[in-house]
Image (tube, helix red, strand yellow):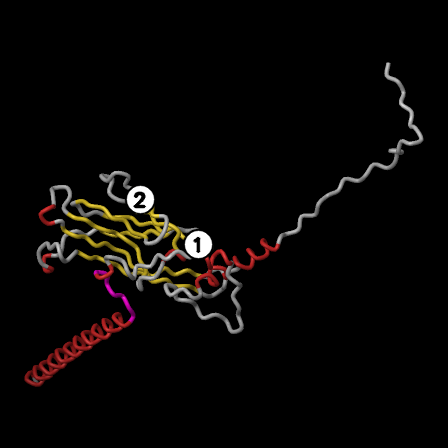
Amino acid sequence: MPQNQTHGADQPDIAGPTPKSQRTKMVKSSDDNENKILAKKLKDSEICVPIVYGNIAFWLGKKASEYQSHKWTVYVRSSTNEDLGVLIKRAVFQLHSSFNNPMRVVEGPPFELSESGWGEFEIVITLHFHGDVTEKPLHLYHRLKLYPEEESGSLSMKKPVVVESYDEIVLSEPSEGFLARVQNHPAVIMPRLPSGFALPPVPMEDINSGKRGDTKNHPLSQWFTNFSEADELLKLAAARQQVQAHIARLRRQLSLLDGQQQLKSASDM
């Protein structure tokens, strides 16, 4: 039977009210508030990023075999050869099923893939963007071209076959954080910001973590097509002249037909 314990004079009195349980009030941290500000959308605005995708193929000449006739590179680049890593996180190239590991993932710029082969086929290029850009991937479809058109001449080891397409990635209502991150990037066409509008500061890790991935000094850059605005304006001007000349010819033909019709009517009277 347990013995009763008595409280001595030197023992503290532990009797008294039971202490209340303490509850910690959760307060949103400043990081949460900053993330809210960075994620805020800028209404009625859009960002444009001109891109080029395509391939360059070199004939192997005497080294060509039945199944290895060309060395080729397929890629996605900025139209001005700037770094697209500010926008694109990774690119996935889906090749023909006859290739080993036909789904190739490129985790950073430059977004390109080199292979060799003999056949032409469609390549699906899927672009995955950074989290502050958009969650939706973009699918591009490119027909790999190895052989020149008949009017372009025969196969040559010195002059490759180049096929490129111009496109623009348009992002509607971008987040303020993304705008702040790319506001001075040469690959991005920024929207006109409202008067007095100030973008949030860019986190230091975004400033210091930039990776140089432009294609200005790319070994294949001499073969890239120039899609500058000046060239496009010249092409539009030339097309306009052709249209105007065609309209003038049609007007002359209509005038001749009207004259013939009038002469015929006069002779019938």
Closer to us: 238 or 35: 35
**Bounds of the magenta span?**
223-229
Q: Mark 2 points at which residue?
A: 104
Q: In this view, does 105 lie to the left or right of 181?
A: left
Q: Label 2's element?
A: strand
Q: In which quarter of the image is the N terminus?
A: top right
- Mark 2 vs 1, N-terminal side: 2
Of circles 2 and 1, which is in front? 2
Instruction: List x then y, in percent, for residue 111.
Output: 32, 52
Q: Label 1's element?
A: loop
Query: Dot 1: few (<14), some (14–19), or many (≥20) neighbours within 10 Å?
Result: some
Query: What residue is drawn where x is 20% and y is 57%?
Result: 162
Query: Dot 2: few (<14), some (14–19), or many (≥20) neighbours within 10 Å?
Result: some
Q: Quadrant location of residue 169?
A: bottom left
Query: What residue is drawn where x is 31% and y is 44%?
Result: 104
Q: Which three-letter amino acid code belongs to the residue tagged 2?
A: Arg
Q: In this view, does 66 lie to the left or right of 170?
A: left
Q: Which mark is residue 134?
A: 1
Instruction: List x then y, in percent, for residue 188.
Output: 39, 64
- State the residue lying farthest toward the left: 267
